[in-house]
Amino acid sequence: MSTHDVTLLTSVVEHHQPSGTPGIQVTSYSMSGEPHAAAIVDAVTADYHRVTGRPPVTDKHLAELVDQRVTLLRVGKNMLGAGALVASPGTIFQGSGLALRPKGKQRHGYRIEAGSVLDLEPGYAGVQVLRRRVAAVRATLPQLTELTQERLARLPSSGGDCSLAVFGTWQLPDVTSAGAIWLLRSYLRGADIAEACWSFVRSTVSVSTAASSARSFCTSAARSSAHRSSPGGKRWR
């Protein structure tokens, strides 16, 4: 990401902590990102074109905009790997490949390709338009809190109703599914195994499971909710 980018959604989270000095508050940042915020960035990226109805950006389209001022909506990461969606105003130019010269720069830029560009607006004034679109997609997703080992430990060791909904990015050796949901009903502490009575994955994923390592859930996010359900699996569209 560039210092000229405008961050619209990020997995970096602020933490406000009291200090020993009256009237002073300490704010810290998880610059490598936090799992529950990263799960939302992944899901917004995956859902963006479906929710907004915007067409995917292609390399051909970018090439047709050489020497034009644009505002790109890009998927990026900071130096520590925290994911974000950023608006990047600049001018597309042709170097050894397609590149973007940031607004206000007379020379230099960075390479761009369609795989990292979700959307674009003509001109430099597209930031607010893109911000509203990202916010609209984010509004379709749940509000999350961090999944902790303490929250898992409150589940019974066997059986029970589904009492914990877990939302995150499901990463398997050959496929990644953003916005997956597991409804958990038990947790085996010694084995670190959580049992799900239902799992919901996107229709592009051809596999589902009722039991997964709780460590994978701890890298995503969770929120508590009461569910009554029967065992099974279902794809989430």
Image (cartoon, helix red, strand yellow):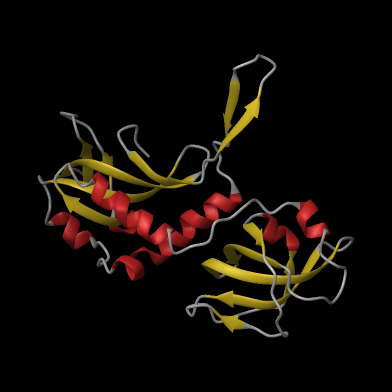
Tell me which residue sits at (43%, 59%) in the image: 139
Tell me which residue sits at (60%, 31%) in the image: 16
Tell me which residue sits at (60%, 24%) in the image: 26
| Residue 97 seen in the figure | no
Please tell me which residue lies in front, 70 or 161: 161
| Residue 124 seen in the figure | yes
Q: Report x, y in % for residue 102.
A: 23, 36
Number of marks drawn: 0
Q: Is residue 8 left or right of residue 110?
A: right
Q: Report x, y in % for residue 142.
A: 53, 61
Against 12, residue 196 (above or below) is below
Q: Specify the quadrant that holds the N terminus.
A: top left
Q: Quadrant of residue 89?
A: top left
Q: Quadrant of residue 50?
A: bottom left
Q: Report x, y in % for residue 107.
A: 18, 30
Please tell me which residue lies in front, 48 or 135: 135
Q: Is residue 80 left or right of residue 124?
A: right
Q: Report x, y in % for residue 98.
A: 21, 48
Tell me which residue sits at (34%, 36%) in the image: 2
Please tell me which residue lies in front, 62 or 86: 86
Against 219, residue 80 (above or below) is above
Q: Quadrant of residue 87?
A: top left
Against 162, residue 92 (above or below) is above
Q: Is residue 206 left or right of residue 45?
A: right
Taking the view exactly as shown, the residue that stands out farthest to the front is 23
Q: Is residue 100 left or right of residue 66?
A: right
